[in-house]
Amino acid sequence: MGQPVRDYLLTLCVTAAVTCLLTGPVRKFAIAAGAMPAIRARDVHREPTPRLGGIAMFGGLCAGLIVAAHLHNLDWVFRQSSEPRALLSGAALIWLIGVLDDKFEIDALIKLGGQMIAAAVMVLQGLTILWLPIPGIGTVALTQWQGTLLTVALVVITINAVNFVDGLDGLAAGMVCIASAAFFLYTYRLWYGHMIEAAAPATLFTAILMGMCLGFLPHNMHPARIFMGDSGSMLIGLVLAAGAISVTGQVDPDTMKIFAGSEREATHAMLPVFIPLLLPLTIIAIPAADLVLAIVRRTWNGQSPFAADRGHLHHRLLEIGHSHSRSVLIMYFWSALIAFGAVGYSVHSASLWIVLVIVGLSALGLVLLLMPRFTPRAPYWAERFVPPRYRHRRAHGDEAVSGGASGVAQEAQQGPAEGQMGEAGGGRRERPPTAAAGVRGVNGATALSARSRLSDRDTADSAR
């Protein structure tokens, strides 16, 4: 068996390419099917945007599994393990529930029940937690019911953590991509570096998950042309949870004696990313923290934990003055710091320089949080490669995006609150092109019906 890194790279690229190519047709289908709800009170986008991006991501998942099943270094995973089949079964079920929710807005409790059923389907096919490494004790075998309940709980927590953070353009896909990249390095080291074959399915899952997110991001970055919707956010959350369950509950810590000395030392060495109950907090700590804070906040206010509001972390970043793009980048930064920091610490837990680097980067992140009005400027030679808001101002002034004489007149009538977009970084931001009269505003979409504008976004009748 040769080094499979090239096969993983090929699987990742095929998954990303299929997802990217399918997103365009899926977007047109979503518009035609009416899966494009009106602006709601807690939404941050200004124009109705189609959902159902999860259809393209599910297509990328299927393509990645098919390609991997025919590669020399990965086909044995499908012959010797039932985990890929379990993942596909659970993913198909959760994806179908998400598609129905994107179109018909099903009840939150029904979605929760569907998430539990999808997790149970994976458990029935062998993707479950068999034991736990407990510090100071070693390996603790779980009964069938204990493993099932713990697996279902981990899947539901991870799915809802990713779903809760899906509030800004490109945020959920980027954060999950960062988490899966860090997780891939960890699982690949376990399998190929230490020849633990039980980590191979999780390595495959994380490679496919990276491809799904990378293929969807070009269509989902600000301003997004399509949203992944619940069909996408719940899907990538389930795939991430499946990888965590596979490597955490299936790999016996006793096999790590070859590089950790003993079972107890192995347990301590792999503790940062090896306990299932802590894995969502170390790999996707930001979404998990947002999930916990949202539940506490809504319960404290006498609301249902599933009630929508504008109190998520990304909403807070916008409120203190950060722009949309900067808020997403800040969330990326913290996700990468926590995910790669946990993986790095699991490799060299005794290295002081890793702790110092994490502390230094954390201080840098706090500084970025406290500087919402600072707008970085690119060098003159690189201005053609960056958005206009990061370019230096010329002496003769910047060219404004007017959209024609009618656009200027419409902007004067709408006023600064609706016709202009403020620059959180102190510079100038481009105003999106104004749709012509009689055209409904869809991000990058062709006109389908009369344009419908909201005079006051706060009067929207539903919440995201």
Image (cartoon, rainbow, N blue to C red):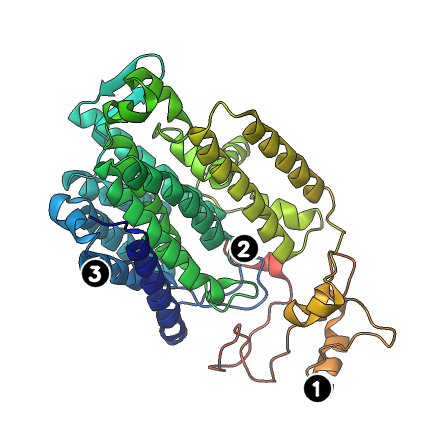
Instruction: Please name the residue that numbered disc 2 is placed on.
Output: 168
Residue 114 screen position, x and y as percent: 27, 46
Image-quadrant location for residue 398: bottom right
Q: Is residue 101 above or below residue 80?
A: below
Indicate which disc, 1 or 2, sits on the residue closer to the N terminus: 2
* Callout 2: SS: loop
Residue drawn at x 76%, y 70% is 415
Instruction: Please name the residue that numbered disc 3 is placed on.
Output: 66
Q: Nearer the viewer, residue 134 or 56?
A: 134
Q: Nearer the viewer, mark 1 or mark 3?
A: 3
Q: Nearer the viewer, mark 3 or mark 2?
A: 3
Indicate which disc, 3 or 2, sits on the residue closer to the N terminus: 3
Amino acid marked by disc 1: Gly
Residue 158 screen position, x and y as percent: 38, 40
Indicate which disc, 1 or 3, sits on the residue closer to the N terminus: 3
Amino acid marked by disc 3: Ile
Q: Which label was assigned to residue 404?
A: 1
Residue drawn at x 75%, y 68% is 380
Q: CA distance from mark 1 to mark 2?
A: 29 Å
Near mark 2 (Cα within 10 A), the count class, few <14, some 14-19 or many ≥20, is many
Q: Is residue 140 above or below residue 454?
A: above
